[in-house]
Amino acid sequence: MNSIEACIALNMLPTVGPVRLRKLLQVFNEPENILAAKRDQLRKVEGIGKDVADQISNWESIVDLPEELKRVKDFGATVITQNSPSYPKPLREIHAPPIVLYVWGEIQERDQHASAISTRSGSSARVAPLTMAASARKSSPTNLLTRG
């Protein structure tokens, strides 16, 4: 598993958002290390209680990562994280920047002021993000879609 795949998996967990991820990365340094961490190691991180630690420890029973990666590929999208040079600078600067961005098309300089569609809250949060992007792509050459 690479860093992007680990970020996708973490992003798909209902209890992990950008703020918790930032705290976890301060301790574990890499997203892959977070998913590999033992429950008791996770609990030592500020803001990570039993339920969150249990969810991260059992992520493979909650997240269907191969299916999500297939959707990304089938849609023709790419996924970028905050570590990517193409991650929009204005998003990096907000308090809780999206964990991942699903990108259809290419991000260009003019897109540094683009908006992202967030589906983190509400009942649609678990809906496949690329399905929702399908209708958006008809009207825009570059779409950013985040679940964080």
Image: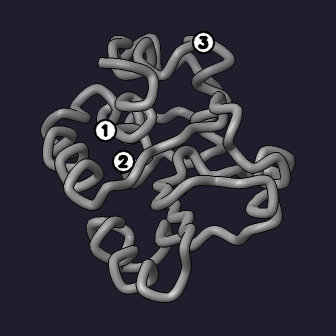
Task: Work out whether mark 1 precedes mark 2 in sequence or the reverse, and give the earlier one.
Answer: 2
Q: Position of residue 46 (x, y in %)?
A: 65, 27
Element marked by disc 1: helix
Type of amino acid at the residue the image marks with label 2: Leu
Q: Mark number for residue 55?
A: 1
Separation of residues labelled 2 and 3 (CA atoms): 19 Å
Q: Mark number for residue 33?
A: none
The answer to the question of whether label 1 and label 3 lie on touching residues, with beta carbons closer than 8 A, is: no
Name the residue rendered at 37%, 19% in the picture.
Answer: 2
Query: Which quadrant of the figure contains the N terminus?
Result: top left
Q: Position of residue 120 (x, y in %)?
A: 49, 66
| Nearest-to-viewer mark from 1 and 2 | 2
Q: Mark number for residue 13?
A: 2
Q: Position of residue 89 (x, y in %)?
A: 82, 46
Left or right of residue 53: residue 17: right
Label 3 CA crowd tier, 10 Å (few <14, some 14–19, many 20+): few
Query: Which quadrant of the figure contains the C terminus?
Result: bottom right
Type of amino acid at the residue the image marks with label 3: Asn
The answer to the question of whether label 2 and label 3 lie on touching residues, with beta carbons closer than 8 A, is: no
Q: 10 above or below 104?
A: above
Q: Where is mark 3, residue-wise?
A: 29
Type of amino acid at the residue the image marks with label 1: Gln
Name the residue rendered at 14%, 48% in the picture.
Answer: 67
Element marked by disc 3: loop
Separation of residues labelled 1 and 3 (CA atoms): 19 Å
Which image quarter: residue 132? bottom left
Q: Position of residue 15 (x, y in %)?
A: 44, 49
Separation of residues labelled 1 and 2 (CA atoms): 7 Å
